[in-house]
Amino acid sequence: MNTHFHFTAQLSATPRAARLARLLAVEQLRSWGLPFDGAAQVVAELCANAVTHGRVPGRDFRLELSVTDEGRVRIEVSDSRGDELPREPRYGLTIVDAFSSSWGSSPGPVPRKSVWAELGS
């Protein structure tokens, strides 16, 4: 992985923080010289889901951006509700599915889960 293309932000699980995550992602991708329109939509959806469906009072969510060795932008959002992993595109995940070349979810470490998406070819 291109380690110099890595960004992480820990944010409170609030709608305001989800909006902030989108703004931070756009600025980070812009600073890397990468396209950000599709990524902004994916970040907005994954962070909104973390705040709406993955929120546990008193716990944060984490946004990670990176660039893979293949040049894809990888977006990963982790929240504290690891008991339910999304497995199919429904509701807002259809947006994630439309903008990404692949996406998925993974458990852990307990009690967390991560939902990720990769954009680009």
Image: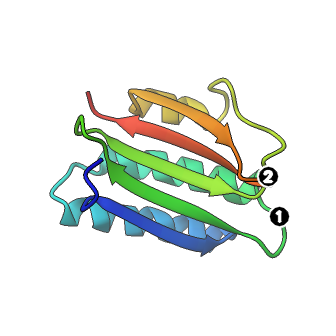
Q: Which mark is residue 56?
A: 1
Tell me the element at label 1.
loop
State the quadrant of the C terminus: top left
CA distance for labels 1 and 2: 7 Å
Q: Position of residue 55 (x, y in %)?
A: 78, 60
| Left or right, residue 69 beside residue 42 | left
Q: Residue at x 67, y 33 (%)?
A: 91
| Residue at 65% in and 38% down | 106
Spot the residue most to the left: 33
Q: Residue at the spot x=29%, y=51% of the render?
A: 36
Residue 17 figure quarter: bottom right
Snapshot quadrant of residue 105: top right
Q: Secondary structure at mark 2?
A: loop
Report the coloring of the rendering: rainbow
Q: Amino acid at mark 2?
A: Arg
| Badge 1 vs badge 2, beta-carbon distance below 8 Å | yes
Mark closest to the chain's N terminus, 1 or 2: 1
Q: Crowdedness of circle 2 by 10 Å Cα count: few (<14), some, many (20+)?
A: many
In the rendered image, residue 19, in percent from the top left (x then y), is placed at 52, 66
Amino acid of disc 1 = Val
Crowding around mark 1 (Cα neighbors within 10 Å: few <14, some 14 to 19, many 20+) is some
Q: Return the x and y of residue 32 as percentages of the image width and height.
A: 19, 60
Determine which quarter of the picture holds residue 26: bottom left
What percent of the width, then of the height, locates residue 47?
Answer: 58, 56
Q: Is residue 107 left or right of residue 65?
A: right
| Residue receiving disc 2 | 81
> Closest to the observer: 28 or 22?
28
Task: Classify residue 47 as left or right of residue 13.
Answer: left
